[in-house]
Amino acid sequence: MTSPLGRIVIYTKKIEQMSEFYSRHFGFSVSCDEGDRILELKPQAIGASILLHPASAKQKEGQALVKLVFDVDDVTAFCEAASVAGLKFGKIHQADGYVFANAKDPSGNSVQVSSRAFARG
């Protein structure tokens, strides 16, 4: 049996900043049912949704054990456009047939743009 990844939950104390970040820089649309404390970010096309869940007082934000990777065909162009929009990526790294760059979201979570999906076919 196979099951596609449908949602990623991010616990955060910065719901508004996080929804703005993922909407502005990665094109997610915001959805929230009245009375629901979880805010859902839906991708424009195919892909997993991101659920922003309020973090408890004891939860630490920005765990280094998870990284969200966004597939982009042209990493350099994406990083340049993101910079104009206020998102600064680090150095663009050359890997085995693809490139990638890293940044952080408002809660300190690692995000990456990568051309790996386009290089591997």
Image (tube, helix red, strand yellow):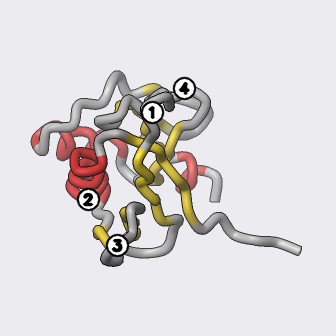
Most foreground residue, 78 or 9: 9
Q: CA distance from mark 3 to mark 4?
A: 31 Å
Indicate which disc, 3 or 4, sits on the residue closer to the N terminus: 3
Quarter assignment of residue 23: bottom left
Whether 89 is drawn above or below 11: the answer is: above
Amino acid at dot 4: Ala
Q: On the image, numbered disc 3 is attached to which residue?
A: 35
Q: Give the side of residue 15 with respect to residue 111, left or right.
A: left
Q: Which residue is at a point 28% across and 63% down the rendered structure image?
A: 27
Q: In the image, residue 93 lies at what x, y percent? A: 45, 26
Label 2 neighbour load within 10 Å: few <14, some 14-19, many 20+: some
Give neighbour class at mark 4: few <14, some 14-19, many 20+ (Cα, 10 Å): few
Instruction: Tell me the number on the disc at residue 23.
Output: 2
At label 1, the amino acid type is Ser
Q: Which residue is mark 4?
A: 64
Q: Which label lies toward us, 1 or 3?
A: 3
First reached walking from the N terminus: tag 2 or tag 1: 2
The kind of residue on which mark 2 rests is Ser
**Amino acid type of disc 3?**
Gly
Q: Residue at x 82, y 72 (%)?
A: 2
Q: Nearer the viewer, mark 2 or mark 3?
A: 3
